[in-house]
Amino acid sequence: MTIYNAVVCPMDGPQIPKGFVTWENGVITQVGDMSRCPTPVSGQDVDAQGGYVLPGFVDVHCHLGLLADGLSYDEDDCNEVSDPCTPQLRVIDALYPLDHCFQEAREAGVTTVLTSPGSANAIGGQIAAIKTVGRWVDDMVVLEPAAMKFALGENPKKTYSGRNEAPATRMATAALMREQLRKALEYAERVAKHEADPENEDAPDYDAVLEALVPVMQGKLPVHFHAHRADDIATALRIAKEFHLDYVLVHATEGYLVADILAREGARAIVGPIIGDRSKPELARQRVTNAARLVEAGVPVAICTDHSELPIQYLPLSAALAAREGMDPEAALKAITLTAAELGGIAHRVGSLTPGKDADIVLCSGHPFELNAKVQAVFINGTPVK
């Protein structure tokens, strides 16, 4: 199938003013100028009539499927607040793909998300990357686990101090993280020794919590650090250095205040939600210019909605606002496509119109940052979903 006569935005190369995209069996096969467009054009093919063709948008931090619209108790599976350290939890065990917000995501061109446990716990559980179409979660998975959720700052502190339990301070939250990571390191070492020498009687009993953290300690599973304030961001980097973690900052609300330091440290950030009020203390210095300031300093930035904090259909609008407030427009578009996929560890599958990648494709009547531009068609794995 082919979309032709389009302004093609591959994201891994320059814009093609008049081009085409072709796919077969759910995989992109060709991208190029109309002079190279395959002929003849079949009845199934789409004449874009000058519209914009882009890769499907990627929301790299949200809670889609965990917090259903019109939230009730039975539709809230975001935070397991029985224990502040729950790395053994898998988000796919709570996802509800029949929530109508998945349809709203597709209609806005959002084809892939990283959906995450909430931030009430110091260690919240395992994040999954999924497509936004399907009725059976296992068929929607792109990568699982995609990352491990850690959270610093106000949320763990508020959750547990109100119950007279630890962590009641930022210090205790960081200490719990260190304790679990150190235990996971020792657990992995004992397992390795036993596997090398089965006669060794020092084999540890199975521990689901520590077992889940072993890939984190081995650098095989990234950590997504929820951190708003600059001091929490600093703590995230400190812990990441101590344990040699592969990490990404999530929210980084005060990142612009330390943007030069984050660039120096090689940090990467998922910024958002950009649209919203300063509804709690650690958002007091929230600025729409945050993403622009970070990118200007040299920090790779993706933009997220944190759905349902901001409904997921406003992901393109968030990127447009970031561009309006000084973010390089190309970087802003990549922040919801290629850079988002890279920070989510799924750029081998999605994020650009690259031959060999999934045929997740969006056709817009105009540039997606134009307020009046409409999403005309969406394809996931090559199948029309809008």
Image (cartoon, grey):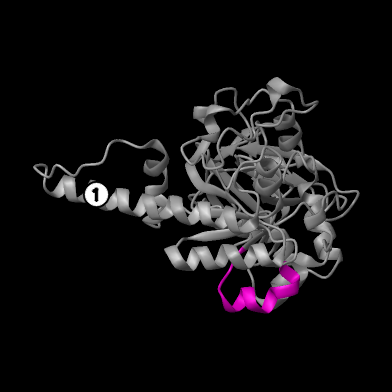
Residue located 35% across and 37% down the image: 207
Quadrant that contains the N terminus:
top right
The part of the chain drawn in magenta is 255-268
Question: Is residue 159 rendered to the left or right of residue 223?
Answer: right
Question: Is residue 380 rendered to the left or right of residue 211?
Answer: right
Q: Give the vertical position of 380 relative to 135 (above or below).
A: below
Question: Which residue position is annotated with label 1?
Answer: 190
Which residue is at the front of the view, 86 or 368? Answer: 86
| Residue 37 x, y percent position in the rendering | 61, 52
Residue located 17% across and 45% down the image: 195
Prevailing secondary structure of the magenta residues:
helix
Element marked by disc 1: helix
Three-letter code, disc 1: Arg
Look at the image and say whether residue 259 sits in the magenta stretch: yes
Give the residue furthest to the left. Answer: 199
| Residue 263 x, y percent position in the rendering | 62, 76
